Image (cartoon, helix red, strand yellow):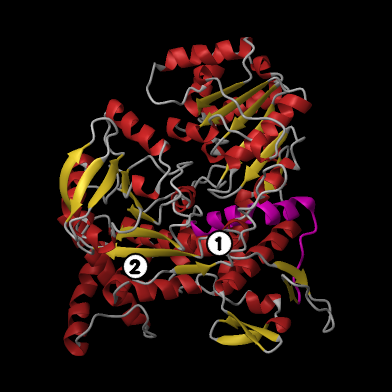
Amino acid sequence: MPDIVHVTYAQTGKSASTNPLGMREMQEKAYQARDAQYLLLKAPPASGKSRALMFIALDKLINQGIKKIIVAVPEKSIGGSFRSTDLTDHGFYADWEINDAYNLCTPGDDGGKSKVQTFKNFLNNGERIIICTHATLRFAVDELDESMFDGTLLAIDEFHHVSADADSRLGEHLRSIMKKSNAHIMAMTGSYFRGDSVPVLLPEDEEKFTKVTYNYYEQLNGYRHLKSLGIGYHFYQGRYTTAILDILDTTKKTILHIPNVNSGESTKDKEKEVGFILDAIGDVTHQDSDTGVIYVRRHLDGKIIKVADLVNDNAKDRDKIVAYLRDMNSVDDMDLIIALGMAKEGFDWPYCEHALTVGYRGSLTEIIQIIGRCTRDSDNKTHAQFTNLIAEPDAQREEVNLSVNNMLKAITASLLMEQVLAPNFKFKTKLNDDDEAKPGEIKIRGLKEPSSKRVKDIVESDLNDLKAAILQDNTMLKAMPGNMDPEVINKVLIPKIIQIKYPNLTEDEVEELRQYVVVDSVVKNAEIKEIGDKRFIRMADSFVNIDDLHIDLIDRINPFQKAFEILSKSVTTHVLKLIQESIEINRIQVSEDEAILTWPKIKDFYATFNREPSFASLDPLEKRMAEVLLYIKDQKRRQANGN
């Protein structure tokens, strides 16, 4: 199946080059905000967030009166990104030096209590830097007074793990530390949205943060080697293990994430799944007892390839292979990594060419993190690929509605990623015919520009997060197959979602933000052509001169149109019909009595026309028969599955 998204980049080298202090473009941008007490750094995987923290933290230690640095990461394997680093040889005025005794993320586990005690000792001794997991931080704060964090910089990596939810201990601790100490906070994330409806921070806390945003386009366009990125989906029937080799190309450096054991795609035996995948690739010759690397002789050509199994739950075996992966420095050190929950966030394998994920991922954050595993710049590749292997809906299975919903969310996630990966435009109000746009601008008649700082900040830093909330909303998903008027989507549904996400915005601010979201989505989904000195944009089925755009025209465009086109091309007519029926079954209301009375008429209709009644019919009687037939099918499926 061809890619849903394919983006090419200019290879300017800008994001990979360094200034006289040894800082890359993003790091320099973050360093300019180093004096902020609360700093939120939003930058894509591989942009160098860990080193940006080092520069800022050292400046706070040396020049800003901060006494201690606490770096918290979600899992031990990510701690390696913050190990001792030589910065002075590259132009900075100090090195990042860690006492190994205070790097609590090294392989091996000496028990949670001793790590908490080490953390408490750190706050009372002369050590300056500690690296720990989010869990260790949570347990330690449980036993400490917030005043102990006075004079510290608390750096939280993968900040989207924090939540404003009352049940989130990490979020609760962070709010308490902000309120009851003078601690500085640096929050880092490659993707701020969590994939659920709970915000990362409460609005009043979020407003205290200085935000530094470096987008995916800036990062990838500034690489030296990587030229293109593809995002695609492959649909399968039955068990994924029978379809895996259709997609898994072991000649490409690949990270394969198998499905969560609680998902419908899982066989419920993750070790057997790994064994099946290995057997499908070739014959296991041996496993290195020191490193844990599995050596497989490939059926394809007899070549021996190296495989890492991160699915294995044995802690001793896991630590061996994690240590090996952390110290890799050659393209020949690894060929395939099979993982389940690991190797997503902060995992650094620059040579990775293909991120292959089995099963729908409900969190857009997780999708961005996984894609980030293959978007490092490396001289062994010019193209990076993300592929999601997803179960095709089956009419006979009970979870058909869930499968349909997952498929729709997967498609909308790809659309969002396309917009995240695209260059940004600035949209301005066109005042008259002589009002020409500057480079990078598009001027639109009737557009209401952001009038308040709050709306400007959302547009600047949170637009993709807002789009994620919109695109993954269940009501919006039901509008995706083209069964809702575009103006209803744009002027009714989208404002409602904005109001829920940002309840403190005024009515005028909601409208300004709504217009910006719709315009940005429609323009980034559209095809733009240059003919001579003019630019034309495809709106629906015709091209319009960009200089003639009006907000009223844009509001008549379905922002899901491209998703529907993708869906239509990606699946069979039968599956498309299943998707439509799955959406309709939640809308229609049919009683058992009506079904009994209508069933003979449905059989007569089929006998007469040799087809089922259609939802698209202009005859209201035929349309109602189609609805009743769908109700009968759904009841039969439920009975067959014991419901």
- Judged left or right of residue 13, residue 286 is left
Which span of residues is magenta-colored?
445-472
Residue 470 located within the stretch drawn in magenta: yes
Nearer the observer, 643 or 13: 13
**How many neighbours does mark 1 have within 10 angstroms: few (below 14), some (14-19), or many (20 or more)?**
many
**Residue hosting label 2:** 579
**Looking at the picture, how far across and down is residue 99, in whole percent?**
55, 20
Q: Is residue 23 above or below residue 84?
A: below
**Looking at the picture, how far across and down is residue 542, in whole percent?**
57, 87
- Judged left or right of residue 307, residue 435 is right
Whether residue 606 is visible to the viewer of this picture, yes or no, is yes
- Judged left or right of residue 526, residue 390 is left
**How many neighbours does mark 2 have within 10 angstroms: few (below 14), some (14-19), or many (20 or more)?**
many
**Looking at the picture, how far across and down is residue 192, in whole percent?**
57, 46
Nearer the observer, 100 or 490: 100
Residue 402 located within the stretch drawn in magenta: no
The numbered mark, 1 or 2, whose residue comes first in the sequence reads 1
Picture quarter with the N terminus: bottom left
Residue at 27% across, 74% down:
574
* Magenta span dominant secondary structure: helix
**Residue hosting label 1:** 421
